[in-house]
Amino acid sequence: MSLGYIGSLTVRVEMPWVTNLKEKRALVRPVVERLKARFPVTVARLDGLNAHDWEIIGVVTVSNDRQWVEETLQLAADFIAAQGEYRVAQEERGIVPIEDVME
């Protein structure tokens, strides 16, 4: 039995109609902030920060219950897809036992 699980979610969002970084941040940042406030997760804007038409959002959570981690990541993915004025182009999830990342 594992001590606990770390779950990660990365979501690539695309908005090819956006023409500048300020406009993109206005679409992505509120979703990231609401995600952090609504769910027990840590969220970061990981990549595409200098691109005006795409970005990768990362979400991480930890728990001793694998099913809870899976459900939380699903809720976060659904929230991201439903909230923003962008298109979700790619989504990846992973769940690993805490022991696998400890030295």
Image (spheres, helix red, strand yellow):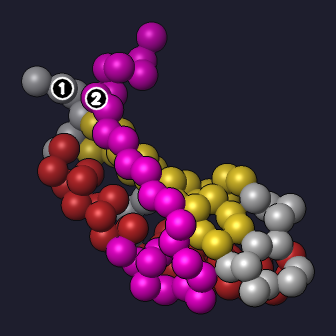
Pick the residue in front: 88 or 10.
88
Please indicate whether residue 98 sits to the left or right of residue 22 in the image: left
Q: Amino acid at mark 1?
A: Ser
Find residue 97 and name its label.
2
Whether residues under marks 1 and 2 lie with C-beta atoms below 8 angstroms apart, the answer is: yes
Residue sitting at x 82%, y 72%? 52
Q: Neighbour class for label 1 at 10 Å: few (<14), some, many (≥20)?
A: few
Q: Which residues are magenta?
A: 78-103
Choose top left, top right, bottom left or bottom right for residue 6: top left
Q: Is residue 92 left or right of residue 71?
A: right
Mark 1 vs mark 2: which is more N-terminal? Answer: 1
Q: Residue, x 43% and y 85% (percent of image)?
A: 82
Q: Is residue 10 left or right of residue 72?
A: right
Residue 23's x, y, as percent? 81, 86
Is any atom of residue 42 visible in this view? no
Q: Is residue 95 something that shows in the picture?
A: yes
Residue at 55 percent across and 78 percent down: it is: 87
Which numbered disc covers residue 2?
1
Name the residue located 86 percent from the left edge and 83 percent from the top edge.
19
Hey, what amino acid is under mark 2?
Answer: Pro
Residue 2's place in the image compared with 87, above or below, is above
Q: Give the left or right position of residue 76, taking residue 97 as reference.
A: right
